[in-house]
Amino acid sequence: MKVKLAGSQSLNGAVTVSGAKNSATRVLAAALLSSGCVNLRNFPLALEDAKAKINFMQELGAKIKINEPQSELELSVPTLSFDGIKDFSLPIRTTYLLAAGALARNGHAKVPYPGGCKIGSRGYDLHMMVWRQLGCAVDECPEYIDVRGRLTGGVIDFPISTVGGTENALMCASVASGETLIRNAYVTPEISDLIAFLREMGAHIVQEGSSHIRVQGSGGLLRGASFSIMPDRIEALTWIILGAVTGGNLLVHNVPFETMEVPLIHLRDAGIDLFRNSSTVMVSPDCIGPHGIQPFELATGTHPGVISDMQSFFAFLGFFANGRSVVFDYRYPERIAYAHELEKFAPGAIVAEPGKITVQGPNRLHGAKAKSTDLRGSMAQIMAAICAEGESQVDGVELALRGYNNLPEKLASLGVSAQWSD
Ligand SMILES: CC(=O)N[C@H]1[C@@H](OP(=O)(O)OP(=O)(O)OC[C@H]2O[C@@H](n3ccc(=O)[nH]c3=O)[C@H](O)[C@@H]2O)O[C@H](CO)[C@@H](O)[C@@H]1O
Ligand SMILES: C=C(OP(=O)(O)O)C(=O)O
């Protein structure tokens, strides 16, 4: 899929941040742990990743009713089995979270190999460790990972901060029999959302300080629940940065400020001062200080810092800064393919080396034809195309649609002229 955009556009009007991809896709899988009915609100139904997971879960046996106008879905799971699955190619990352529900019911899961964005080495050994530590046998078959056994409490000690590993451990431990201790757990805002949902379903999860979690397993399925997905901090940051550089008057609603303090401090240091109340921010030319956008240097890493998924938006912001900005990424040093495509809008402005992106500003961006390489990179290219002088085309934008709910509709409502086509 591609998008053609007329350049030099500003964003005007109001936009509401949708439910977070990195919470919704996890909570959806966690709903498989319930023997009752689960109602999910503020659910980003248009996300490609959500749609792919919903389809796969329906093939497994989940009954899912979608209420599109209300952004809600209702789910119940009379039976759950991998036996009828013919095609195990699932393009999303969090396939491993489909295991817990099946293990709790049948003691057996066939987990599609994890997909997701190609942003560097993305192992799955820690997931196998989780299942093994909780008493299961794991076998890497050609098409899927075979996991078999009765989930039993144990100790899981993560050697690194892992989002997916912590999520998998929490879900498996919640339905295991006995107690599980998760050491060096990594609790992001989206994982706090997952914990809140698991607790709504009756899970006994106690956080001991910031990195130990103790779970008293239920030894079986959990109860039904109703839950509202938290707003997406990455989407919120995207709108704020795009609004700041395009010079329109943009009101962004449903901003989870408490989850993005550090990224906002970096924006303030770069000369972008925001007018905000508890969950809304006004972005307009008045936000930019008298000396324009200031060059900056930052490193992405773990929360509460700037996370790797925000890297491309800061690189994009560097285009407009009065000098040289540097963005380091220690978690995904290979996440630079997009930068070569982004540079097409300002040839010579970006130097991308593993772990380090240098952007020389300020630039007037020119219309270009770019190719999406990953979700956040694709979005940064769309942002550049909106700002550039002249027409641009960004190919492969289904990658951006993996993580931006109703993106074409939201851009159109803000006055951005764009043609989306296959
Ligand atoms: C800690 C961190 O920054 N996590 C990011 C990671 O989450 P995601 O959940 O994809 O990855 P993890 O947080 O689990 O993994 C972090 C690191 O550990 C490695 N790893 C992970 C699991 C495993 O079994 N073996 C293994 O070696 C990965 O290759 C990666 O380098 O990518 C997502 C998509 O960009 C981001 O939203 C997350 O913020
Ligand atoms: C890379 C991302 O997601 P995933 O882990 O689903 O590939 C992302 O959200 O930027």
Image: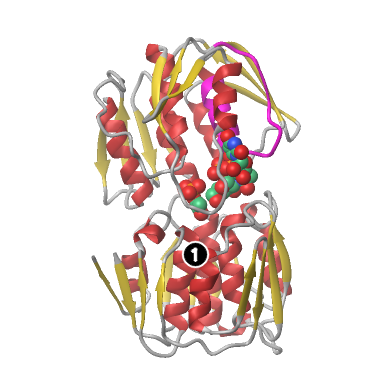
Where residue 352 appears, as percent x and y from the top left, is 62, 70
Task: Left or right? Give the position of 279 relative to 333.
Answer: left
Q: Residues within 10 Å of mark 1 (few under 14, many from 20)?
A: many
Q: Quadrant of residue 153?
A: top right
Locate the N terminus by quadrant.
bottom left
Q: Which residues are magenta?
A: 152-173
Does residue 394 sit above or below 388 in this rendering? above
Q: Quadrant of residue 225?
A: top left
Residue farthest along the front direction in this orientation: 142
Q: Looking at the image, which residue is at 28% across and 18% down?
A: 79
Locate the C terminus by quadrant.
bottom left
Q: How is the image coloured?
A: secondary structure
Camera-side residue of 292 and 381: 381
Taking the magenta stretch, the answer to whether it contains residue 372 is no
Camera-side residue of 138 and 360: 138
Where residue 135 appears, as percent x and y from the top left, is 56, 12
Say what secondary structure mark 1 lies in.
Answer: helix
Q: Quadrant of residue 233?
A: bottom right
Where residue 103 appears, as percent x and y from the top left, is 43, 17
Taking the magenta stretch, the answer to whether it contains residue 165 is yes
Amino acid type indicated by mark 1: Gly
Q: Specify whether residue 356 is in view.
A: yes
Write down which quadrant ligand 1 falls in. Answer: top right
Q: Specify whether residue 11 is in view.
A: no
Q: Looking at the image, which residue is at 66% across and 51% down?
A: 331
Where residue 125 appears, as percent x and y from the top left, is 57, 31
Does residue 197 sit above or below 287 in this rendering? above
Does residue 418 sit above or below 157 in this rendering? below
Q: Which residue is mark 1?
A: 377
Q: Looking at the image, which residue is at 53% across and 29% down?
A: 168
Task: Left or right? Give the position of 37 relative to 65.
Answer: right
